[in-house]
Image: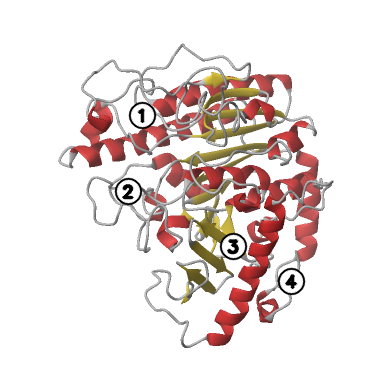
Protein backbone atom coordinates (compact mmCIF):
# COMPACT_ATOMS: atom_id res chain seq x y z
CA UNK A 1 0.00 0.00 0.00
CA UNK A 2 1.46 3.36 -1.02
CA UNK A 3 0.73 6.67 0.60
CA UNK A 4 1.49 10.09 -0.91
CA UNK A 5 1.49 12.86 1.66
CA UNK A 6 3.62 15.12 3.74
CA UNK A 7 4.43 12.09 5.84
CA UNK A 8 7.00 11.02 3.27
CA UNK A 9 9.21 13.57 4.95
CA UNK A 10 9.34 11.13 7.85
CA UNK A 11 10.57 8.26 5.67
CA UNK A 12 14.27 7.97 6.30
CA UNK A 13 16.27 4.88 5.58
CA UNK A 14 19.41 5.95 7.35
CA UNK A 15 22.54 5.36 5.36
CA UNK A 16 24.56 6.96 8.13
CA UNK A 17 25.39 3.51 9.46
CA UNK A 18 27.24 1.06 7.25
CA UNK A 19 24.56 -0.27 4.91
CA UNK A 20 27.09 -2.53 3.22
CA UNK A 21 27.70 -4.11 6.61
CA UNK A 22 23.93 -4.55 6.95
CA UNK A 23 23.74 -6.29 3.60
CA UNK A 24 26.58 -8.57 4.64
CA UNK A 25 24.83 -9.33 7.92
CA UNK A 26 21.61 -10.05 6.05
CA UNK A 27 23.38 -12.66 3.92
CA UNK A 28 24.70 -14.33 7.07
CA UNK A 29 21.25 -14.18 8.67
CA UNK A 30 19.68 -15.96 5.70
CA UNK A 31 22.27 -18.70 5.82
CA UNK A 32 21.62 -19.30 9.51
CA UNK A 33 17.93 -20.38 9.33
CA UNK A 34 17.42 -19.45 12.98
CA UNK A 35 14.98 -21.11 15.33
CA UNK A 36 12.16 -18.70 16.13
CA UNK A 37 10.23 -18.43 19.40
CA UNK A 38 7.37 -15.96 19.88
CA UNK A 39 6.58 -15.55 23.59
CA UNK A 40 3.69 -13.43 24.78
CA UNK A 41 2.21 -12.63 28.16
CA UNK A 42 -1.50 -11.91 28.56
CA UNK A 43 -2.46 -8.47 29.94
CA UNK A 44 1.09 -7.68 31.09
CA UNK A 45 1.52 -3.92 31.36
CA UNK A 46 4.44 -1.95 29.92
CA UNK A 47 5.43 -1.00 33.45
CA UNK A 48 5.27 -4.49 34.98
CA UNK A 49 8.75 -5.95 34.20
CA UNK A 50 11.88 -4.75 35.94
CA UNK A 51 13.66 -3.72 32.75
CA UNK A 52 10.98 -1.03 32.26
CA UNK A 53 11.55 0.31 35.75
CA UNK A 54 9.35 -1.78 38.02
CA UNK A 55 10.93 -1.85 41.48
CA UNK A 56 8.61 -4.46 43.00
CA UNK A 57 7.93 -7.34 40.61
CA UNK A 58 10.85 -9.77 40.37
CA UNK A 59 11.60 -10.52 36.70
CA UNK A 60 15.32 -11.43 36.54
CA UNK A 61 15.04 -13.46 33.35
CA UNK A 62 13.25 -10.78 31.35
CA UNK A 63 15.68 -8.23 32.75
CA UNK A 64 18.62 -10.37 31.68
CA UNK A 65 17.14 -10.78 28.20
CA UNK A 66 16.86 -7.01 28.00
CA UNK A 67 20.43 -6.51 29.22
CA UNK A 68 21.80 -8.86 26.54
CA UNK A 69 19.36 -8.36 23.68
CA UNK A 70 17.46 -5.65 21.85
CA UNK A 71 14.76 -3.65 23.63
CA UNK A 72 11.96 -1.88 21.80
CA UNK A 73 11.17 1.17 23.91
CA UNK A 74 8.04 1.76 21.82
CA UNK A 75 6.63 -1.67 21.01
CA UNK A 76 2.91 -1.84 20.21
CA UNK A 77 0.29 -4.53 20.30
CA UNK A 78 -1.87 -4.16 17.22
CA UNK A 79 -4.94 -4.00 19.44
CA UNK A 80 -5.81 -3.13 23.05
CA UNK A 81 -7.41 -6.58 23.47
CA UNK A 82 -6.11 -10.09 23.08
CA UNK A 83 -7.57 -11.96 20.07
CA UNK A 84 -6.83 -9.28 17.45
CA UNK A 85 -3.22 -8.90 18.60
CA UNK A 86 -2.65 -12.66 18.42
CA UNK A 87 -3.95 -12.68 14.85
CA UNK A 88 -1.58 -9.86 13.90
CA UNK A 89 1.42 -11.84 15.17
CA UNK A 90 0.72 -14.68 12.76
CA UNK A 91 -0.48 -12.79 9.67
CA UNK A 92 1.23 -9.38 9.60
CA UNK A 93 -2.21 -7.98 8.82
CA UNK A 94 -4.57 -5.95 10.94
CA UNK A 95 -7.36 -8.22 12.23
CA UNK A 96 -10.04 -5.80 11.04
CA UNK A 97 -9.18 -7.11 7.57
CA UNK A 98 -10.64 -10.52 8.41
CA UNK A 99 -13.22 -10.03 11.10
CA UNK A 100 -11.41 -10.46 14.44
CA UNK A 101 -12.72 -7.24 15.96
CA UNK A 102 -12.28 -8.13 19.63
CA UNK A 103 -11.89 -10.93 22.14
CA UNK A 104 -14.13 -13.91 21.28
CA UNK A 105 -15.15 -12.32 17.99
CA UNK A 106 -14.62 -13.93 14.60
CA UNK A 107 -11.87 -16.44 13.93
CA UNK A 108 -8.73 -16.86 11.83
CA UNK A 109 -10.01 -17.58 8.31
CA UNK A 110 -8.62 -20.48 6.30
CA UNK A 111 -7.60 -18.05 3.56
CA UNK A 112 -5.22 -16.14 5.82
CA UNK A 113 -1.57 -17.15 5.44
CA UNK A 114 0.11 -17.71 8.80
CA UNK A 115 3.74 -17.68 9.83
CA UNK A 116 3.37 -21.31 10.86
CA UNK A 117 2.27 -22.30 7.35
CA UNK A 118 5.03 -20.29 5.71
CA UNK A 119 7.74 -21.68 7.97
CA UNK A 120 6.51 -25.25 7.77
CA UNK A 121 6.85 -24.96 4.00
CA UNK A 122 10.51 -24.03 4.62
CA UNK A 123 11.14 -27.21 6.61
CA UNK A 124 10.50 -25.79 10.08
CA UNK A 125 8.82 -27.86 12.78
CA UNK A 126 5.98 -25.76 14.22
CA UNK A 127 4.32 -25.76 17.62
CA UNK A 128 1.71 -23.73 19.51
CA UNK A 129 1.58 -23.76 23.31
CA UNK A 130 -0.84 -21.89 25.57
CA UNK A 131 -3.67 -19.53 24.73
CA UNK A 132 -4.93 -19.57 21.13
CA UNK A 133 -8.01 -17.32 21.20
CA UNK A 134 -8.33 -17.21 17.39
CA UNK A 135 -11.26 -19.57 17.09
CA UNK A 136 -12.82 -22.57 18.77
CA UNK A 137 -11.02 -25.91 19.16
CA UNK A 138 -13.97 -28.32 19.16
CA UNK A 139 -17.32 -28.73 17.46
CA UNK A 140 -18.40 -31.60 19.68
CA UNK A 141 -18.48 -30.54 23.33
CA UNK A 142 -18.94 -27.39 25.36
CA UNK A 143 -15.52 -25.82 25.86
CA UNK A 144 -14.40 -22.41 27.05
CA UNK A 145 -16.20 -19.32 25.77
CA UNK A 146 -17.52 -20.56 22.42
CA UNK A 147 -16.39 -24.12 21.74
CA UNK A 148 -19.23 -26.48 20.85
CA UNK A 149 -21.80 -23.69 21.02
CA UNK A 150 -21.73 -22.28 17.50
CA UNK A 151 -22.16 -25.31 15.21
CA UNK A 152 -18.59 -24.91 14.06
CA UNK A 153 -19.03 -21.40 12.66
CA UNK A 154 -15.83 -20.24 14.37
CA UNK A 155 -13.97 -23.55 14.48
CA UNK A 156 -10.35 -22.63 13.66
CA UNK A 157 -7.83 -24.62 15.73
CA UNK A 158 -4.08 -24.04 15.45
CA UNK A 159 -3.47 -27.48 13.94
CA UNK A 160 -5.47 -26.33 10.91
CA UNK A 161 -3.34 -23.18 10.56
CA UNK A 162 0.12 -24.66 10.18
CA UNK A 163 1.04 -26.01 13.61
CA UNK A 164 2.42 -29.55 13.85
CA UNK A 165 2.31 -29.83 17.65
CA UNK A 166 -0.25 -28.15 19.91
CA UNK A 167 -1.03 -27.75 23.58
CA UNK A 168 -3.67 -25.07 23.29
CA UNK A 169 -6.69 -23.55 24.98
CA UNK A 170 -9.39 -21.56 23.26
CA UNK A 171 -9.29 -18.77 25.84
CA UNK A 172 -8.31 -17.96 29.43
CA UNK A 173 -7.71 -20.35 32.31
CA UNK A 174 -6.69 -19.68 35.91
CA UNK A 175 -2.96 -19.09 36.18
CA UNK A 176 -2.70 -21.76 38.91
CA UNK A 177 -4.52 -25.10 38.72
CA UNK A 178 -5.91 -24.08 35.32
CA UNK A 179 -8.63 -26.73 35.17
CA UNK A 180 -10.27 -25.67 38.47
CA UNK A 181 -12.52 -22.65 39.07
CA UNK A 182 -10.98 -20.58 41.89
CA UNK A 183 -13.09 -20.15 45.01
CA UNK A 184 -14.53 -16.65 44.84
CA UNK A 185 -14.32 -16.41 41.03
CA UNK A 186 -17.75 -15.31 39.78
CA UNK A 187 -19.19 -16.26 43.19
CA UNK A 188 -17.90 -19.85 43.13
CA UNK A 189 -17.81 -21.67 46.48
CA UNK A 190 -16.93 -25.17 45.20
CA UNK A 191 -13.14 -25.83 45.43
CA UNK A 192 -13.37 -28.68 42.89
CA UNK A 193 -15.60 -27.07 40.26
CA UNK A 194 -14.13 -27.50 36.73
CA UNK A 195 -13.27 -24.25 34.99
CA UNK A 196 -14.64 -25.49 31.69
CA UNK A 197 -11.72 -24.68 29.40
CA UNK A 198 -9.61 -27.59 28.18
CA UNK A 199 -6.13 -28.01 26.77
CA UNK A 200 -6.20 -29.68 23.35
CA UNK A 201 -3.46 -31.41 21.36
CA UNK A 202 -2.82 -31.43 17.60
CA UNK A 203 -5.00 -34.54 17.20
CA UNK A 204 -8.02 -32.67 18.51
CA UNK A 205 -7.96 -34.60 21.80
CA UNK A 206 -8.31 -33.20 25.31
CA UNK A 207 -5.08 -33.36 27.34
CA UNK A 208 -5.69 -34.81 30.80
CA UNK A 209 -2.24 -35.28 32.35
CA UNK A 210 0.07 -32.84 34.17
CA UNK A 211 -2.43 -30.04 34.63
CA UNK A 212 -1.91 -29.15 38.29
CA UNK A 213 0.05 -26.21 39.63
CA UNK A 214 1.43 -23.15 37.92
CA UNK A 215 0.00 -22.74 34.43
CA UNK A 216 3.15 -21.14 32.96
CA UNK A 217 5.12 -24.20 34.07
CA UNK A 218 2.46 -26.51 32.61
CA UNK A 219 2.77 -24.75 29.24
CA UNK A 220 6.57 -24.88 29.29
CA UNK A 221 6.44 -28.59 30.16
CA UNK A 222 5.03 -29.08 26.65
CA UNK A 223 7.10 -26.51 24.78
CA UNK A 224 10.47 -27.83 26.00
CA UNK A 225 10.06 -31.42 24.68
CA UNK A 226 9.00 -29.98 21.33
CA UNK A 227 12.19 -27.89 21.23
CA UNK A 228 14.36 -30.79 22.39
CA UNK A 229 12.99 -33.07 19.68
CA UNK A 230 13.59 -30.50 16.95
CA UNK A 231 17.14 -29.83 18.19
CA UNK A 232 17.97 -33.53 18.38
CA UNK A 233 16.70 -33.99 14.83
CA UNK A 234 18.64 -30.97 13.60
CA UNK A 235 15.40 -29.37 12.42
CA UNK A 236 14.79 -25.62 12.70
CA UNK A 237 11.65 -24.87 14.69
CA UNK A 238 9.00 -22.21 15.16
CA UNK A 239 7.45 -22.19 18.65
CA UNK A 240 4.60 -19.90 19.69
CA UNK A 241 4.41 -19.79 23.50
CA UNK A 242 1.46 -17.69 24.60
CA UNK A 243 1.18 -17.62 28.40
CA UNK A 244 -2.11 -17.01 30.18
CA UNK A 245 -0.31 -15.01 32.86
CA UNK A 246 -1.23 -12.54 34.23
CA UNK A 247 -4.80 -12.58 32.83
CA UNK A 248 -7.69 -13.02 35.25
CA UNK A 249 -8.33 -15.24 37.14
CA UNK A 250 -4.80 -14.60 38.33
CA UNK A 251 -3.32 -16.86 41.02
CA UNK A 252 0.14 -17.65 42.34
CA UNK A 253 1.40 -20.44 44.57
CA UNK A 254 2.06 -19.86 48.25
CA UNK A 255 5.83 -19.46 47.85
CA UNK A 256 5.45 -16.82 45.17
CA UNK A 257 2.90 -15.01 47.29
CA UNK A 258 5.30 -15.10 50.23
CA UNK A 259 7.84 -13.19 48.12
CA UNK A 260 5.42 -10.27 48.21
CA UNK A 261 4.51 -10.37 51.89
CA UNK A 262 2.89 -7.13 52.99
CA UNK A 263 1.04 -6.45 49.76
CA UNK A 264 -2.68 -6.98 49.19
CA UNK A 265 -4.05 -10.40 48.19
CA UNK A 266 -4.57 -9.18 44.62
CA UNK A 267 -1.05 -7.80 44.41
CA UNK A 268 0.57 -10.94 45.83
CA UNK A 269 -1.15 -13.12 43.28
CA UNK A 270 -0.49 -10.76 40.38
CA UNK A 271 3.17 -10.15 41.19
CA UNK A 272 3.78 -13.81 42.03
CA UNK A 273 2.13 -14.97 38.82
CA UNK A 274 4.47 -12.75 36.76
CA UNK A 275 7.52 -13.98 38.66
CA UNK A 276 6.41 -17.58 37.98
CA UNK A 277 6.14 -16.80 34.27
CA UNK A 278 9.58 -15.16 34.36
CA UNK A 279 11.01 -18.36 35.87
CA UNK A 280 9.66 -20.31 32.91
CA UNK A 281 11.32 -17.87 30.53
CA UNK A 282 14.54 -18.74 32.37
CA UNK A 283 13.84 -22.42 31.97
CA UNK A 284 13.32 -21.90 28.23
CA UNK A 285 16.57 -19.98 27.88
CA UNK A 286 18.51 -22.59 29.87
CA UNK A 287 17.11 -25.35 27.68
CA UNK A 288 18.27 -23.79 24.43
CA UNK A 289 21.69 -23.14 25.98
CA UNK A 290 21.97 -26.76 27.13
CA UNK A 291 20.96 -27.93 23.65
CA UNK A 292 23.66 -25.78 22.05
CA UNK A 293 21.17 -23.74 20.01
CA UNK A 294 21.16 -20.52 22.02
CA UNK A 295 23.19 -18.53 19.50
CA UNK A 296 20.98 -19.32 16.52
CA UNK A 297 17.62 -18.88 18.24
CA UNK A 298 15.48 -15.73 18.12
CA UNK A 299 13.37 -15.27 21.25
CA UNK A 300 10.80 -12.48 21.03
CA UNK A 301 8.85 -11.44 24.11
CA UNK A 302 5.89 -9.08 24.39
CA UNK A 303 2.35 -8.74 25.75
CA UNK A 304 -0.95 -8.80 23.87
CA UNK A 305 -2.18 -5.48 25.31
CA UNK A 306 -1.91 -3.24 28.34
CA UNK A 307 -2.91 -4.20 31.88
CA UNK A 308 -6.48 -5.02 32.88
CA UNK A 309 -8.74 -2.70 34.80
CA UNK A 310 -9.23 1.03 35.33
CA UNK A 311 -6.38 3.13 36.60
CA UNK A 312 -5.95 3.40 40.38
CA UNK A 313 -7.90 0.17 40.95
CA UNK A 314 -6.04 -1.99 43.47
CA UNK A 315 -7.97 -5.08 42.35
CA UNK A 316 -6.15 -4.71 39.01
CA UNK A 317 -2.56 -3.99 40.05
CA UNK A 318 -0.90 -4.12 36.62
CA UNK A 319 1.14 -1.08 35.60
CA UNK A 320 1.04 0.80 32.31
CA UNK A 321 4.03 2.80 33.52
CA UNK A 322 3.60 6.54 32.95
CA UNK A 323 1.14 6.07 30.11
CA UNK A 324 -2.52 7.00 29.90
CA UNK A 325 -5.11 4.27 29.41
CA UNK A 326 -5.13 0.52 29.94
CA UNK A 327 -6.51 -2.57 28.24
CA UNK A 328 -9.27 -1.71 25.72
CA UNK A 329 -7.88 1.80 25.15
CA UNK A 330 -5.91 3.03 22.14
CA UNK A 331 -4.09 5.51 24.33
CA UNK A 332 -0.49 4.44 24.95
CA UNK A 333 -1.22 2.47 28.11
CA UNK A 334 -3.54 0.14 26.23
CA UNK A 335 -1.23 -0.71 23.33
CA UNK A 336 2.38 0.13 24.28
CA UNK A 337 3.76 -3.12 25.67
CA UNK A 338 7.10 -4.65 26.69
CA UNK A 339 9.19 -5.72 23.70
CA UNK A 340 12.48 -7.68 23.62
CA UNK A 341 14.39 -9.68 21.04
CA UNK A 342 17.23 -11.95 22.17
CA UNK A 343 19.28 -13.36 19.27
CA UNK A 344 22.92 -13.85 20.31
CA UNK A 345 24.30 -14.74 16.87
CA UNK A 346 23.36 -11.32 15.50
CA UNK A 347 22.68 -9.16 18.55
CA UNK A 348 26.09 -9.33 20.18
CA UNK A 349 25.72 -6.24 22.36
CA UNK A 350 22.65 -4.83 24.10
CA UNK A 351 20.70 -2.25 22.16
CA UNK A 352 17.41 -0.45 22.06
CA UNK A 353 15.34 1.78 19.82
CA UNK A 354 12.57 4.33 20.15
CA UNK A 355 11.40 3.62 16.60
CA UNK A 356 7.80 2.41 17.00
CA UNK A 357 7.50 -1.29 16.15
CA UNK A 358 4.54 -3.65 16.34
CA UNK A 359 3.32 -7.22 16.56
CA UNK A 360 2.32 -6.65 12.92
CA UNK A 361 6.04 -6.56 12.10
CA UNK A 362 6.79 -10.15 13.12
CA UNK A 363 5.76 -11.74 9.82
CA UNK A 364 7.49 -9.37 7.36
CA UNK A 365 10.63 -9.34 9.52
CA UNK A 366 10.85 -13.12 9.79
CA UNK A 367 10.23 -13.49 6.06
CA UNK A 368 13.13 -11.10 5.47
CA UNK A 369 15.31 -13.16 7.81
CA UNK A 370 14.61 -16.25 5.71
CA UNK A 371 14.69 -14.43 2.37
CA UNK A 372 11.26 -15.63 1.34
CA UNK A 373 8.24 -13.78 -0.01
CA UNK A 374 4.55 -14.00 0.73
CA UNK A 375 3.68 -14.84 -2.89
CA UNK A 376 0.49 -12.86 -2.52
CA UNK A 377 -0.56 -9.35 -3.44
CA UNK A 378 -2.69 -8.96 -0.32
CA UNK A 379 -1.77 -5.88 1.76
CA UNK A 380 0.35 -6.26 4.87
CA UNK A 381 0.14 -3.77 7.71
CA UNK A 382 3.51 -4.57 9.27
CA UNK A 383 7.00 -3.85 7.97
CA UNK A 384 10.42 -5.46 8.04
CA UNK A 385 12.24 -4.07 11.09
CA UNK A 386 15.59 -5.81 10.61
CA UNK A 387 17.17 -2.50 9.55
CA UNK A 388 15.97 -1.01 12.84
CA UNK A 389 17.42 -3.90 14.82
CA UNK A 390 20.74 -3.69 12.95
CA UNK A 391 20.93 0.08 13.42
CA UNK A 392 20.67 1.33 9.85
CA UNK A 393 17.13 2.72 10.08
CA UNK A 394 16.12 5.34 12.60
CA UNK A 395 12.61 6.18 11.48
CA UNK A 396 9.54 4.09 10.72
CA UNK A 397 8.76 4.13 7.01
CA UNK A 398 5.23 2.74 7.31
CA UNK A 399 2.52 4.02 9.67
CA UNK A 400 0.99 1.85 12.35
CA UNK A 401 -2.80 1.86 12.19
CA UNK A 402 -5.16 0.93 15.01
CA UNK A 403 -8.88 0.32 15.27
CA UNK A 404 -10.81 -1.06 18.23
CA UNK A 405 -14.54 -0.68 18.66
CA UNK A 406 -15.17 3.06 18.11
CA UNK A 407 -11.53 4.06 18.52
CA UNK A 408 -9.09 4.83 15.71
CA UNK A 409 -5.43 5.82 15.70
CA UNK A 410 -2.50 6.26 13.33
CA UNK A 411 1.14 6.70 14.35
CA UNK A 412 4.44 7.54 12.74
CA UNK A 413 7.56 8.30 14.73
CA UNK A 414 6.51 11.62 16.18
CA UNK A 415 2.79 12.17 15.87
CA UNK A 416 -0.10 9.99 16.94
CA UNK A 417 -3.62 10.85 15.83
CA UNK A 418 -6.39 9.41 18.03
CA UNK A 419 -10.17 9.36 17.68
CA UNK A 420 -12.64 8.06 20.23
CA UNK A 421 -15.61 8.29 17.86
CA UNK A 422 -14.62 6.74 14.50
CA UNK A 423 -13.21 10.00 13.16
CA UNK A 424 -15.90 12.45 14.20
CA UNK A 425 -13.23 14.20 16.28
CA UNK A 426 -9.48 13.86 16.67
CA UNK A 427 -6.75 14.33 19.25
CA UNK A 428 -3.12 14.77 18.19
CA UNK A 429 -0.10 13.98 20.37
CA UNK A 430 3.63 14.34 19.89
CA UNK A 431 4.45 10.98 21.47
CA UNK A 432 8.20 11.55 21.25
CA UNK A 433 7.92 14.55 23.56
CA UNK A 434 4.64 13.68 25.28
CA UNK A 435 4.33 9.94 25.66
CA UNK A 436 1.83 10.50 28.46
CA UNK A 437 -0.54 12.12 25.92
CA UNK A 438 -1.33 15.11 28.09
CA UNK A 439 -1.15 17.88 25.47
CA UNK A 440 -3.59 17.68 22.59
CA UNK A 441 -2.05 19.50 19.59
CA UNK A 442 -4.99 19.10 17.21
CA UNK A 443 -5.94 22.78 17.26
CA UNK A 444 -2.31 23.84 16.77
CA UNK A 445 -1.51 21.44 13.91
CA UNK A 446 -4.61 21.32 11.66
CA UNK A 447 -2.58 20.33 8.58
CA UNK A 448 -1.07 17.36 10.37
CA UNK A 449 -4.53 16.30 11.54
CA UNK A 450 -5.90 16.64 8.01
CA UNK A 451 -3.14 14.63 6.36
CA UNK A 452 -3.04 11.87 8.97
CA UNK A 453 -6.83 11.55 9.07
CA UNK A 454 -6.90 11.16 5.27
CA UNK A 455 -4.40 8.32 5.52
CA UNK A 456 -6.45 6.75 8.27
CA UNK A 457 -9.61 6.81 6.16
CA UNK A 458 -7.75 5.34 3.18
CA UNK A 459 -6.59 2.53 5.41
CA UNK A 460 -10.12 1.93 6.71
CA UNK A 461 -11.33 1.65 3.12
CA UNK A 462 -8.59 -0.88 2.43
CA UNK A 463 -9.65 -2.91 5.47
CA UNK A 464 -13.26 -2.83 4.29
CA UNK A 465 -12.18 -4.20 0.92
CA UNK A 466 -10.20 -6.95 2.65
CA UNK A 467 -13.14 -7.85 4.87
CA UNK A 468 -15.31 -8.26 1.79
CA UNK A 469 -12.91 -11.02 0.65
CA UNK A 470 -11.12 -9.11 -2.09
CA UNK A 471 -7.66 -10.14 -0.83
CA UNK A 472 -8.31 -13.83 -1.37
CA UNK A 473 -8.57 -13.98 -5.14
CA UNK A 474 -4.92 -15.12 -5.35
**Other residues around mark 4 within 10 Å, as few (<14) / some (14–19) / many (≥20):** few
Secondary structure of the residue carrying tag 4 is: loop
Residue that numbered label 3 is attached to: 401
Residue that numbered label 4 is attached to: 15
Taking the image as shown, residue 286 lies to the left or right of residue 4, namely left
- Label 2 and label 3: CA atoms lie apart by 25 Å
Pick the residue in front: 256 or 391.
Answer: 256
Pick the residue in front: 363 or 417.
Answer: 417
Secondary structure of the residue carrying tag 1 is: loop
Q: Earlier in the sequence, mark 3 or mark 1?
A: 1
Marks 4, 2: nearer the viewer: 2
Residue 358: give x, y in percent of width and height: 58, 55
Residue at horizontal 83 percent and vertical 47 percent from the top? 473
Q: Earlier in the sequence, mark 4 or mark 2?
A: 4
Q: Earlier in the sequence, mark 1 or mark 2?
A: 1
Tell whether label 4 touches label 3 (CB within 8 Å): no
Above or below, 327 against 451 in this view is above
- Label 4 and label 2: CA atoms lie apart by 40 Å
Above or below, 208 against 145 in this view is above
Does residue 383 appear in the picture of this structure? Answer: no
Residue 330: give x, y in percent of width and height: 46, 61
Residue at horizontal 62 percent and vertical 79 percent from the top? 451
Above or below, 430 against 422 in this view is below
Residue that numbered label 1 is attached to: 174
* The N terminus, quarter of image: bottom right
- Label 3 and label 4: CA atoms lie apart by 26 Å
Secondary structure of the residue carrying tag 2 is: loop
Residue 452: give x, y in percent of width and height: 60, 75
Residue at horizontal 63 percent and vertical 22 percent from the top? 165
- Label 3 and label 1: CA atoms lie apart by 32 Å
Above or below, 287 against 105 in this view is above
- The tag on residue 318 is 2
Amino acid sequence: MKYISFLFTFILFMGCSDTSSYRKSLKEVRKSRPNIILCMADDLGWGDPGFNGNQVIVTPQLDDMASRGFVFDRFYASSPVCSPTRASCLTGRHPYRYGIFGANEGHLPDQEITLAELLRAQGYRTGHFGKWHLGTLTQDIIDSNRGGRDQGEHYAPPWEHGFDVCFSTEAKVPTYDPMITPVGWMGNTDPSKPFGTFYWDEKGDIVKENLEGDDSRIIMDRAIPFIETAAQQGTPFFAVIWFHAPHLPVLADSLKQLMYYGFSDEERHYYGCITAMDEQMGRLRKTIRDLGIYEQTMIWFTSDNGPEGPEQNKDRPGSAGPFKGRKRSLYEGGVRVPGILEWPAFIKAPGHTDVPCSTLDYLPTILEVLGIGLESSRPLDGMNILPVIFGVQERRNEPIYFESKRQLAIMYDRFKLYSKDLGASFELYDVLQDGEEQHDLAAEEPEVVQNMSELLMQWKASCKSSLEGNDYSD
